[in-house]
Image (tube, rainbow, N blue to C red):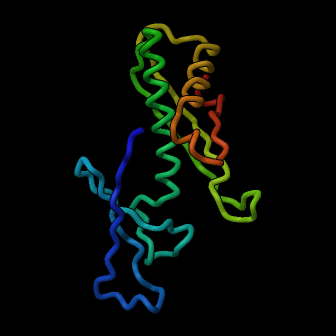
């Protein structure tokens, strides 16, 4: 068993707060010392109460799934002696009403493009690597969201 920690910190400062026009800007602080400026999504809480430049929870959710998948893909590719030069995933998530009638991230679509040094593996090998990565991803295994790899982008 492993445990992971993050600190999420928001401060009111001189804002009124009771008028509901307070800033949703806050920080995510991680054990290694990284501080990430965060905010609500401007799609949910309008500007200027949100900060468009900051990471919002929905973006972080998509990034966490994509990152987890990528890390397993790189590991499994290296075990097959494949040399990955670059891995770029233009992933996206959809926030919609779920089967329980509540808003949720209903889908995350991974759209990875992978560049290899030397011979590119066959589409069957790539498909197997992505399937294996999806099955191993801790984050994808932890959510109700449908997570899929858009094969049009990686084969």
Count the labels in the image: 0
* Nearer the observer, 5 or 153: 5
Q: Identify which residue is drawn at 49% across, 25% down.
A: 73
| In the rendered image, the vertical position of residue 60 relative to residue 137, given as above or below | below
Q: Identify which residue is drawn at 62% across, 54% down.
A: 105
Left or right for 150, reference 3: right
Residue 114 position within the rendered picture, expressed as x and y whole percent measured from the top left = 49, 25
Residue 38 position within the rendered picture, expressed as x and y whole percent measured from the top left = 38, 63
Which image quarter is the N terminus in? Answer: top left
* Nearer the observer, 146 or 138: 138
Residue 37 position within the rendered picture, expressed as x and y whole percent measured from the top left = 33, 61
| In the rendered image, the vertical position of residue 107 relative to residue 85, given as above or below | below
Left or right for 70, reference 124: left
| In the rendered image, the vertical position of residue 92 relative to residue 89, given as above or below | below
Residue lying at the far left of the rendered structure: 33
Left or right for 143, reference 88: right
**Quarter assignment of residue 128:** top right
Q: Identify which residue is drawn at 34% across, 87% down.
A: 15
Residue 52 position within the rendered picture, expressed as x and y whole percent measured from the top left = 43, 65
């Amino acid at each position: 068993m492993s445990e992971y920690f993050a600190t999420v910190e928001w401060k009111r400062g001189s804002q009124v707060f009771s008028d509901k026009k307070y800033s949703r800007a806050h920080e995510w602080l991680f054990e290694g010392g990284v501080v990430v400026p965060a905010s609500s999504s401007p799609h949910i809480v309008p500007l200027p109460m949100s900060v468009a430049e900051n990471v919002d929870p929905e973006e972080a959710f998509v990034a966490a799934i994509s990152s987890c998948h990528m890390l397993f893909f790189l590991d499994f590719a290296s075990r097959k002696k494949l040399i990955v030069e670059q891995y770029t995933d233009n992933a996206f998530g959809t926030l919609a009403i779920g089967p329980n009638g509540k808003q949720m991230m209903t889908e995350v679509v991974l759209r990875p493009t992978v560049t290899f040094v030397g011979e590119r593996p066959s589409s069957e090998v790539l498909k197997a690597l992505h399937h294996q990565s999806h099955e191993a991803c801790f984050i994808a295994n932890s959510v109700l969201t449908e997570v899929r790899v858009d094969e049009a982008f990686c084969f």
